[in-house]
Image (cartoon, coloured by chain):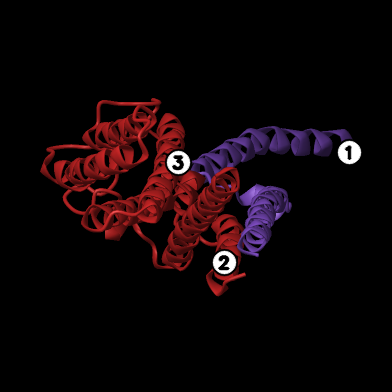
Amino acid sequence: MKWWKYLTIVLLLYTVVMGFLGHVPRLAILNETERNLYFHVPMWFGMTIILLASVINSIRYLRNPSARLDTLAHESAKTGILLGVLGLLTGSLWARYTWGTWWTTDVKLNGAAVTMLIYAAYLVLRGSVSDEQQRARLSAIYNIFAFSAAIPLLFIMPRLAEASLHPGMGGNPGFSKYDLDSGMRLVFYPAVIGWTLLGVWITEVACRFAFVKEKIYEKQEKQLA
Amino acid sequence: MKSKKNNWLSRAVALLLPLLLLAGAALAQTNAAEPEMADALRANGKIYVVVLVLVIIVTGLLVYLIRLDGKVSRLEKEVNN
């Protein structure tokens, strides 16, 4: 097993233990739910990083087409979507117990939801084209569109908005740096790295599985020929 | 004489008790004004139950992923030979 996989295990176990036992500031309304910072926020960090990897592989595909690059882009996008959906679900639950509602028409919430819909369309597009090369090419181009729509929706529009319930107004859309207690950073940064690495790990296994499957099909075709 | 003394004592208690209760209530209120945290839960150790549950879940998911990783590795070896 590669070294970064051991790092993932250590960081995730550290996050789960210290995430509950570590010191957090006493804040009204939030109370103990601020520990969600170690679990909800890293989903979005992980999603953004893995979707960036996906679009980079799509651009590489268009420059130099290969089935391998298409698989890398596709599997990365799938993991990114998984993390994004988990981020939406956990955020909604958190909102229910701090804002009193599952969902509000907030620019950050809606931006994240629209991003997920755009990426869902990526999967729909892939599923609707049977020719492999055409599918790879079309979805690579769509992936560039999806990522260039996601960045304004997640990082630019919230900054232009007048008001938002979500932490981090007038700065980083996820949270304000002043919201972070120095003790919480000691858990938060490892948590971001740990959850992101878990996403990378899942993607790596999914890609290797796809490559092996491809190889087996090739061998079968040779035997038939 | 003795009964008179008892009477005085019981009156003092009767006067002090409501005052003490009021003070107690006031004290409880100042405690409630501070944001509620899971202090009691951690003090009596029950938060560790939650921590252990999550450690079990995360370990379980990681073990599953490690095994899946291993299976793919074996398959890769088999196909390449």
User: Where does the image place residue A204, in percent across and percent down from the top left?
Assistant: 50, 57
Q: Residues within 10 Å of mark 1 (few under 14, many from 20)?
A: few
Q: Quick one: which chain is red?
A: A
Quadrant occupied by the C terminus of chain A: top right
Label 2 chain ID: A
Quarter-wise, where is residue A129 in the image? top left
Q: Quick one: which chain is purple?
A: B
Out of B66 and A44, give the one closest to the viewer: B66
Badge 1 element: helix
User: Where does the image place residue B64, in percent across and percent down from the top left?
Assistant: 68, 51
Give the residue at mark 1: B2
Badge 2 element: helix
> In percent of the image, x 70 and y 51: which residue is there?
B60
> In percent of the image, x 65 and y 39: which residue is there?
B16
Residue furthest front in the image: A225
Left or right of residue A201, residue A139 in this image: left
Dot 2 or dot 3, earlier in sequence: 2
Q: Residues within 10 Å of mark 3 (few under 14, many from 20)?
A: some
Out of A177 and B79, give the one closest to the viewer: B79
Give amino acid for label 3: Leu
Label 3 chain ID: A
Between tags 3 and 1, which lies in front? 3
Marks 3/1 same chain: no
Give the residue at mark 3: A82
Give amino acid for label 2: Lys
User: Where does the image place residue B70, in percent across and percent down from the top left?
Assistant: 67, 60
Badge 3 element: helix
Quadrant occupied by the N terminus of chain A: bottom right
User: How far apart, in angstroms, are the residues tagged by discs 3 and 1?
Assistant: 82 Å
User: Where does the image place residue A84, in percent across and percent down from the top left?
Assistant: 39, 41
Out of A7 and A209, give the one closest to the viewer: A209
The tag on residue A5 is 2
